[in-house]
Image (cartoon, rainbow, N blue to C red):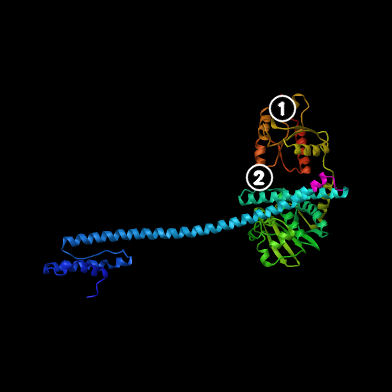
Amino acid sequence: MQNPCPLVLGLENSMPELQSAPANNQELCVLIEQLADQLCPAIDGNFDFSIQVSSRHEGVDKLQMLMNLVLDSAHRALSKLNTTNTELIALNASFELESAKAKRATAAKSEFLARMSHEIRTPMTAILGFAESLRMRELNEAQMTDAIDTIHSNGQYLLGLINDILDMTKIEAGKMEIEHVACTPRSIVAKTMELMSVRAEAKKIGLHADFVGSIPETIVSDPTRVKQILINLLGNAIKFTENGEVRVIVQTVPDPQVDTTEASDEALLQFDVLDSGIGMTESQTQRLFKPFVQADTTMTRRFGGTGLGLAISKELANLLGGDVAVIHSQLGSGTQFRATIATGSLNGVKMLDGNSVEESETLERSAGAQPQDSLLGARILLAEDGIDNQRLITFVLEKAGAEVEVAEDGQCALFKALSAERKGHPFDVILMDMQMPVLDGYQTTTALRCCGYLRPIIALTAQAMTGDRETCINAGCDGYATKPIDRDRLIEELNFQIKRARSASPVKISI
């Protein structure tokens, strides 16, 4: 017989009377020892078993049943404990993962805020500094001109920074709205080149556009977003090029995602932007399209920027059915970026060769050089509560030839508009700030429309997020302009609404 387990030894030591029991109790002793032997695995924490002893003793049977119940209960408790322990391990791993993500997010947020602080404070230093010099009249005429140009360019930079952040926010929220309208590629390229030529001339580098092969006269896309992509790519190329030139090559190419075995009237418009700038290493190019990331921190210190432009351009190109990628870059010898967008259906669209495109571009530039329509003779009600904005916008509109009357809040605007109608000397258009005291622009516009007012109302607002335009139109506005104002666009919108209203010959209303 094997050596008994400690449990059996314990039983034997605790029951000396059984060891000397009469013969008829010997069977009971053997049964108890068998029960004890079978219970030994429980010492190692194993409760997934049951005890089986053949007995004619009622007490032994009850003891066996009780032991099996205890074993089953212990087994279930251990299983639950193991499950809980597994869940705790998984929960702890998840917590560590989320903690790591939170730390990365906090670091990214801190880095972003530090960069934004730098990007905002740098131009603000120039704006406030030169503004103070102008106020103190300590500059000569040439210096004043330079100071004004510096204030304007830094203000434009800040506006672009805000727009980039808003665009990135819209893209990440999945709320970026894309138009699909007929537009002219040659016009988009011409306007972009005209805009970017100022930067290129300032750095004394060449800027050229080439059209290769047949280019569609029109495509179906979003001209504003296509122009934004080109501005970002050309702006980067000019920024990182000290000598030489920047060139954009435009051509029509097949769409690789379209089945070539089937007839298709769709293609891609391809824009290759090449520069002779500083170039990049392969590891640097892999980081380019991440938001708020540039090739390295040295470039950030040397050239500035948020690192948003390329990320936005790639997302916009994707939304337009194409992409943005680095085709080639070599340190010290330049970079080639490629942007593609879908053309939409080209069925029935006239195709132009390179010479035709250039001729059309020249004609368009000539037409664009003609002076814009003035606002001569137009009566405009400016509803605006900001004193500085009142002065600025009034100056711009009066300089364009308009007669301007100011209302400092919505209630005053409502009274002046209706009063002018009653007197038979109405305003041609109302320029309505949407955030005003007493009555805001939405309430004022709604009230005017409820009174039967039919003349044009243009919303003027600093809110430029997705859906803001639709909110203004739904309130009863005919047009939409944003702050800070773009004087050319504002005058163009005012002229459009005035001409549209006059051509429609609205019926005079009784108010």
> How many residues crowd mark 1 within 10 Å: few (<14), some (14–19), many (20+)?
few
Element class at badge 1 = helix
- In the figure, is residue 115 to the left or right of 88? right
Q: Residues within 10 Å of mark 2 (few under 14, many from 20)?
A: some
Report the span colored magenta.
130-139
Q: Give the residue at mark 1.
A: 415
Q: What x and y, as percent, mark residue 453?
A: 70, 29
For residue 243, the mark is: none
The residue carrying mark 2 is 465
State the image coordinates of residue 387 (x, y, percent, origin top left). Answer: 75, 36
In the image, residue 487 above or below residue 55 = above
Q: Viewed as shown, does residue 366 lie left or right of 183? A: right
- Looking at the image, is 25 positioned above or below residue 402? below
What residue appears at the point 26 percent right and 61 percent down from the top-left corner? Answer: 68
| Secondary structure at numbered mark 2 | loop
Q: Is residue 511 magenta?
A: no
Three-letter amino acid code at the position of disc 1: Phe
